[in-house]
RNA sequence: GCCGGCGUAGCUCAAUGGUAGAGCACCUGUUUUGUAAACAGGCGGUUGCGGGUUCGAAUCCCACCGCCGGCUCCA
């Protein structure tokens, strides 16, 4: 066995950043402490993460919140013991022997087997603890000064739900106590932006899991404004881009999804079928025919393409519909508006020739970027998902040449458009490659906010054809695209993105009129009627309260503009403008304010940075 | 779906086996208000649902439903 001091290492297998090293060592120190308190615990793995670290344990005893406190205290002791970390490079046989001697063969031997032949196998040791580990680590356990254990969670061994579920302890660590405190404070503040909390406070939507059902949001009037403004934007944008709107029912016969090929792939995430029983009184002719709630709009749209004879002159044909779809998501996966069971897709299907594909695909990507600019959305990641040849015929349709061809086309468009993207294998749709746009919710969870997919398989299954210029028949390619994803998720995301401080064009209530006393009520009513007639969403605060209380209500309701109306203003046909961004802006003529407001709405201006 | 935690008034939370309570919101009255909370009174709960233990259950036990933190999955 070769024993090396860390300081003398020239090139550890996978050098980590100093922060990753600290957190990685945090997870080893966590395991050290757990084994002291629960020697029978079996270890799996404990890597650093973007925000901290975790370690997975298999243990009969269920960790409790009190255990976390004790473990954290023990970790503190380990840190204070100032244990040096040692790296030991060993042979495969020696490694297995070490694992057995420590009674950790249950998971560690499997982890050892994962290490490819020829790669250096190493252990890291601190104090009495030793773990199979590529490294790297801090030099002394005392480096771990600012850390905190955060939560206990179940996690499947190797992330596979067929495997045993282990207990995962999450924690975080920072170089300094100040940074840790800042991080914990950020977590607290993130909770205030959580769309579930704001949705309730701002009266945007509700869930009634008992009577309506889990994952089925009910939109209150204020939330409905958000959806409809979003749709208005989408309709304008798509009209300009040559899309045509269509409408299709929410249900369809089983046959439609057998034709599309969705049922074998998606049956589990569809609501169970409605079955019309033979002899049922209302439907005497029914003979066990099944109807499904639609989980996607494409089969219906394919039917619309096929409904009329199509020529190459009709292409590209762009059919748009914000159709409501229903997916039976597993109960544990529901999350506010981000993951629901009824959703409106910002959907359209573009049927085109191979020659037209690049331009169409590119135009769709540009539409994404245009939307993201309007919303000031800067932090996202484009993910290009391709197929895995090993899964052909299982997860992906078995047409290897078409996969290659379309994936090459997509990659070329992305590169030519200069779009930054990451490529991930084995994540494509079953009918073709796709581009997803990933964003992160305020609580750090990753979501696909938009998607753009190529379909080279399903149009053929529907027998879709067009007549070419040479008077032959050809099958169109189909682009499925939803730049605003589903309106539920997009709005959930926007609520967090803006922290409820929506741009004026989106704000459910754009202007709040606040008379100082009863004496200005008539003036207030007149302004309200004028603004309303101008298409502005306005309310008049008629409560019998002091001005401060009314202002406060306006702030809490996150209304962009509060107009204070006193005697002077009524006299001069003026308003005292208080904006959410700048606070008290002083008195100005009402006509002047109205013009400014209309312009701000018409240009869909982003909110100005809020003063602190 | 799985592991763990939690379900009390519209909201935020008290009440650890002995009469369910507070603040805010809402309604009424007084006050007539100048840029983030005037004062007083009133309304409001079979403690998620169903069983069980007990003289007695919000509280203890069981099952179900839901929510939350993760895992898995996904727009």
Image (spheres, coloured by chain):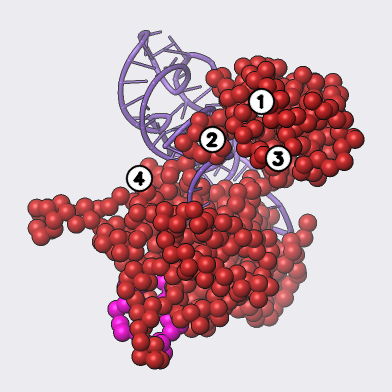
Asked if badge 3 and badge 2 are on a common chain, one would say: yes
Of the residues under marks 4 and 1, which one precedes in the sequence?
Answer: 1
Question: In whole angstroms, how far apart are the C-alphas of marks 3 and 2?
Answer: 29 Å
Which residue is pictured at 27% across the width and 52% down the height?
A: A273
* Residue at mark 3: A118
Q: Is residue A397 magenta?
A: no
Asked if badge 1 and badge 2 are on a common chain, one would say: yes
For label 1, the crowd category at 10 Å Cα-Cα, with few meaning under 14, some 14 to 19 and many 20 or more, is some
* Residue at mark 4: A211
The chain that hosts pointer 3 is: A
Image spot of residue A253 (x, y percent): 25, 61
Task: From the rendered image, report the letter of the chain displayed in purple.
Answer: B
Start-end of magenta stretch: A301-321
In front of the other: label 3 or label 2? 3
Of the residues under marks 3 and 4, which one precedes in the sequence?
Answer: 3
The chain that hosts pointer 2 is: A
């Amino acid at each position: 066995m070769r024993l090396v001091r860390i300081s003398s290492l020239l090139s550890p297998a996978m050098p980590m950043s100093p922060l990753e090293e600290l957190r990685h060592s945090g997870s080893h120190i966590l395991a050290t402490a757990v084994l002291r308190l629960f020697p029978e615990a079996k270890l799996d793995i404990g890597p650093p993460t973007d925000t901290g670290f975790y370690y997975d344990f298999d243990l009969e005893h269920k960790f409790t919140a009190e255990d976390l406190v004790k473990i954290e205290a023990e970790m503190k002791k380990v840190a204070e013991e100032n244990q040096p970390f040692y790296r030991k490079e060993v042979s495969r046989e020696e490694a297995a022997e070490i694992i057995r001697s420590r009674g950790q063969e249950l998971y560690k031997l499997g982890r050892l087997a994962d290490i490819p032949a020829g790669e250096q196998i190493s252990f890291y040791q601190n104090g009495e603890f030793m773990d199979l580990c590529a490294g790297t680590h801090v030099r002394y356990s005392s480096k771990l000064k600012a850390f905190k254990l955060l939560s206990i969670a179940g996690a499947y061994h190797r992330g596979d739900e067929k495997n045993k579920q282990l207990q995962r302890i999450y924690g975080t660590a920072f170089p300094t106590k100040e940074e840790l405190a800042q991080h914990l404070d950020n977590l607290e503040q993130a909770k205030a932006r959580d769309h579930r909390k704001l949705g309730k406070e701002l009266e945007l939507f509700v869930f009634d899991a008992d009577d309506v059902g889990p994952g089925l949001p009910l939109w209150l009037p204020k939330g409905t404004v958000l959806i409809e403004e979003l749709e208005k934007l989408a309709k304008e944008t798509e009209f300009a881009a040559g899309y045509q709107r269509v409408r299709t029912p929410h249900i369809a016969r089983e046959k439609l999804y057998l034709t599309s090929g969705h049922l074998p792939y998606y049956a589990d995430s569809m609501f169970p079928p409605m079955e019309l029983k033979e002899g049922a009184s209302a439907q005497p002719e029914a003979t066990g025919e099944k109807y499904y709630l639609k989980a996607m709009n494409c089969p219906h749209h394919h039917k619309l393409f096929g409904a009329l004879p199509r020529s190459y002159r009709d292409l590209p044909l762009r059919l748009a519909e914000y159709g409501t779809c229903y997916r039976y998501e597993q109960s544990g996966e529901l999350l506010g508006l981000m993951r629901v069971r009824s959703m409106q897709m910002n959907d359209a299907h573009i049927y085109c020739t191979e020659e037209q594909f690049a331009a169409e695909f590119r135009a769709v990507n540009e539409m994404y970027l245009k939307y993201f600019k309007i919303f000031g959305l800067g932090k996202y990641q484009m993910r290009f998902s391709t197929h895995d040849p090993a899964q052909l015929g299982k997860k992906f349709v078995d047409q290897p040449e078409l996969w290659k061809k379309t994936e090459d086309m997509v990659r070329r468009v992305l590169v030519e458009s200069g779009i930054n993207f990451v490529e991930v294998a084995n994540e494509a749709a079953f009918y073709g490659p796709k581009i997803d746009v990933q964003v992160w919710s305020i609580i750090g969870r990753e979501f696909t906010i938009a998607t753009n997919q190529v379909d080279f398989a399903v149009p053929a299954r529907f027998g879709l054809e067009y007549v070419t210029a040479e008077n032959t028949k050809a099958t169109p390619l189909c682009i499925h695209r939803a730049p605003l994803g589903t309106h539920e998720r997009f709005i959930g995301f926007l609520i967090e993105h803006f922290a409820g401080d929506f741009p004026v064009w989106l704000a459910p209530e754009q202007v709040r009129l606040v008379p100082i006393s009863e004496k200005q009520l008539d003036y207030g009513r007149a302004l309200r009627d004028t603004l309303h007639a101008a298409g502005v969403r306005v309310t008049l605060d008629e409560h019998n309260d002091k001005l401060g209380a009314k202002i406060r209500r306006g702030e809490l309701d996150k209304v962009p503009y509060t107009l204070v109306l006193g005697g002077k203003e009524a006299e001069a046909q003026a308003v005292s403008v208080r904006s959410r961004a700048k606070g008290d802006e002083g008195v100005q003529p009402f006509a002047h304010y109205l013009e400014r407001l209309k312009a701000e709405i018409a240009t869909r201006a982003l909110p100005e940075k809020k003063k602190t």
